[in-house]
Amino acid sequence: MRLLMIFCDGVGIGRADPETNPFFHAPLPTFSSLLNSRLPHLRCQRVQTGQATLVPLNATLRVSGLPQSGTGQTALITGVNAAKLIGKHFGPYPYSTLRPVLRAKNIFRQLKDLGKRVCYANAYPRQFFQYLASGNTRLTATVLSCLYADVQIRDEPALVTGRAVSSDFTRERWRNLGYEQLETITPEQAGEHLYALSQEFDFTLFDYFFTDHAGHSQSMQQSVEVLRSLDRFIAGILSRFEEQETLLLLTSDHGNIEDLTTKSHTRNPVPLFLLGRRRDEVARELANLTHLTPCLVKALARG
């Protein structure tokens, strides 16, 4: 069994209102097809079709205030209620008290201890590695987990050969970072590259942050463009997807883009989209962010 997890920052389940929720404004043919045109909303949070399963995950974790990325992502990739541990939601980067938790319990570490092969698929430019070398510590929960678990952080050569994926799918943003000669690709091609890479590992994680950026912008146009790119990216994965071999998951850490009436995050549940092997079995065990890593570790331990 292989697990391919796509993390989309700032995606919640909101109202079925095309004026405020870009999921109901944007044409999303891939998601619509998989979910039989039944995109989730607050009055219908669970969707089950012959191809896919979608369940809501509680992102508030019984802590007051608005969920944040630092604690939400830590909860997702360790199974620890990070917000409850420090007494508040915190972000965008993990609170210092959470670093020992990330070091000991991140999903990469847990799976490597079981002898599993793991991969972080995002590619980073030279500026990021210079930032690391300078001693800066404002890093996401995922990057910290990679450093703690000795997981390769991929670079431009890996991206060129299709063994990594740009966070914007198309590589266009790399041109502004001094990579003028880097060939751009379509979101579909990026999805194909991610799926091919994932077949070499037991667990592969890819981070996508532009959903959160679009939500904070409160721009319907920008949000629709981001969601359409994501939809095309998933289409690229599905063009090669073997559901008997792989479980594909897509989830988030907190709400944001689903409600453009506010620039802030929301307390809405976040979606967990599952496609492929043992999707219903896994979905039954999940109700909040802390359930994901223990469930996935157990699933891969069983094989």
Image: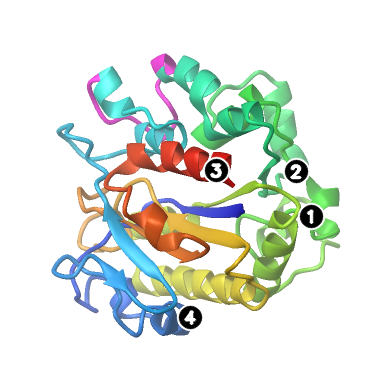
Which numbered tag is attached to residue 302?
3
Amino acid beneath label 2: Arg
Marked residue nearer the N-terminal end (2 or 1): 2
Residue drawn at point x = 70 percent, y = 26 percent: 150
Q: Quadrant of residue 64?
A: top left
Amino acid type, mark 4: Thr
The mark that comes first in sequence, 2 or 4, is: 4
Choose the circle earlier in sequence order: 4 or 3: 4
**Display colour scheme:** rainbow
Residue segment shown in magenta: 87-97
Which residue is denoted by mark 1 in the rendering?
163
Foreground label between 3 and 2: 3
Amino acid marked by disc 1? Arg
Q: Is residue 171 visible?
A: no
The answer to which of 121 and 213 lies nearer the viewer is 121
Q: Main structural element of the magenta stretch: helix, strand or loop? A: loop
Q: Secondary structure at mark 4?
A: helix
Label at residue 154? 2
Q: Nearer the viewer, residue 222 or 41?
A: 41
The local secondary structure at tag 1 comes to loop
The answer to whether the residues at label 2 and label 1 have Cβ atoms under 8 Å apart is yes
Whole-percent x and y of residue 238?
60, 75
Crowding around mark 3 (Cα neighbors within 10 Å: few <14, some 14 to 19, many 20+) is: few
Marks 4 and 1 sit apart, C-alpha to C-alpha, by 24 Å
Asked if residue 287 lies left or right of residue 125, the reply is: left
Element class at badge 3: helix
Label 4 belongs to which residue?
Answer: 30
- Frontmost of labels 2 and 4 is 4
Number of the front mark, 3 or 1: 3
On screen, residue 25 above or below 57: below
